[in-house]
Amino acid sequence: MRDLLTGGVIAAALGLAGCGSEGRSGEDTRPTQTVSTPATEPGGAAIAPRPALPDWFDCLRREKALVIAAHRGGPAPGYPENALETLQRGAEAGLYLFEVDVAESADGVQFLMHDDTLTRTTTGSGRVADTQWAQIQDLRLVDRDGEVTEFTPPRLSDLLDWAVAENVVIELDAKRSASYETMVETVRAAGASDHVILISYTEGQARALNGHAPEMMLTADALNAADIEALASAGIDRDRLIAWTGNESPAPQAWAALRAESVEPAFGTLGRPGDRLDDAWRADGDLSEFVGLAEDGVVLLATDAPLDVAAALRADDRAFAACGR
């Protein structure tokens, strides 16, 4: 979990010299890219340039560090899933990476919503794809306990503006109603390409997303060198690839194989309440299984309990101490 400095931005001077992308042999094959940031903090202290997102993930892998992804933004009582206020709460607590869902209204406005219908998470009803934004924008979001909040569905563009201002990273999961082209155009218009990871579930989706946004990072299913080679043959740059390895059973052998290919492994402890690893591993109050994921090589951990997991880990602290961002 990152320390919260002025404006919520990490001013880390470490990691840039050692955070360039690796080749297949483990040697650096290209210079580390950086992203322009102000030269000083408001008080006048010099700050290090922010590493580009692919280089930051390379550094995490080399340092055996881990970043936590708050699934659906990290909902909690009073804070619904996919609400900007929920993400703000997480950022203020030190979280850095948030997974959200992107849907699209009948008139082409993209906003955060997981389901095909409005019923479960809002005060409205009907299919998302059949509903105009004017009808959606004033609905109230409902938390996981069924309580109506004062929060409203946020547009994707508003989320991205917030992410850039807060210097956080967003994983975008496009739902069936959402156009990839519109989503990518919205990311670029916000200047948020270096704050975004696109999520794919099939090789076809990975190809399509990469075709629209070859400059953006991407998650795709992969467990071994053959999977990585297949994705590379499809034109996907392994330097911008995160390998999703599922959310059922830890797979240390797969994670080792992926790391040997200079690709960051991702794993999820999220899922259906009562069935997910998040619940099983927290039931006895001993969160050592989460610590074991970092030790076994996971670089991105998607969880429905981000604050609990962050409190148990040190590998997420190491991410910012060693790699900046």
Image (cartoon, helix red, strand yellow):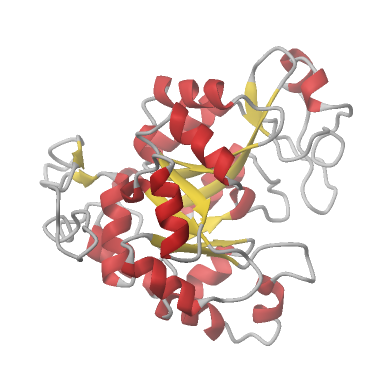
Q: Position of residue 26 (x, y in %)?
A: 20, 66
Q: How many marks?
A: 0
> What is the quadrant of residue 268 in the picture?
bottom right
| Residue 6 appearing in the image | yes
Give the answer, above or below, for where 13 lies relative to 65. above
Between 91 and 44, which is closer to the camera in this rendering?
91
Give the answer, above or below, for where 6 lies relative to 14. above
Q: Position of residue 137 (x, y in %)?
A: 71, 21
Residue at image point 18% right, 43% down: 33
Residue at image point 77% right, 62% down: 272
Residue at image point 14% right, 40% down: 40
Q: Where is residue 300 in the image (x, y as percent from the top left)?
A: 46, 61
**Lateral position of residue 195 relative to residue 47, left or right:** right
Q: Quadrant of the N terminus?
A: bottom left
| Residue 94 appearing in the image | no
Q: Position of residue 247 (x, y in %)?
A: 63, 66
**Lateral position of residue 273 relative to residue 18, left or right:** right
Between 310 and 230, which is closer to the camera in this rendering?
230
Give the answer, above or below, for where 160 lies relative to 245. above
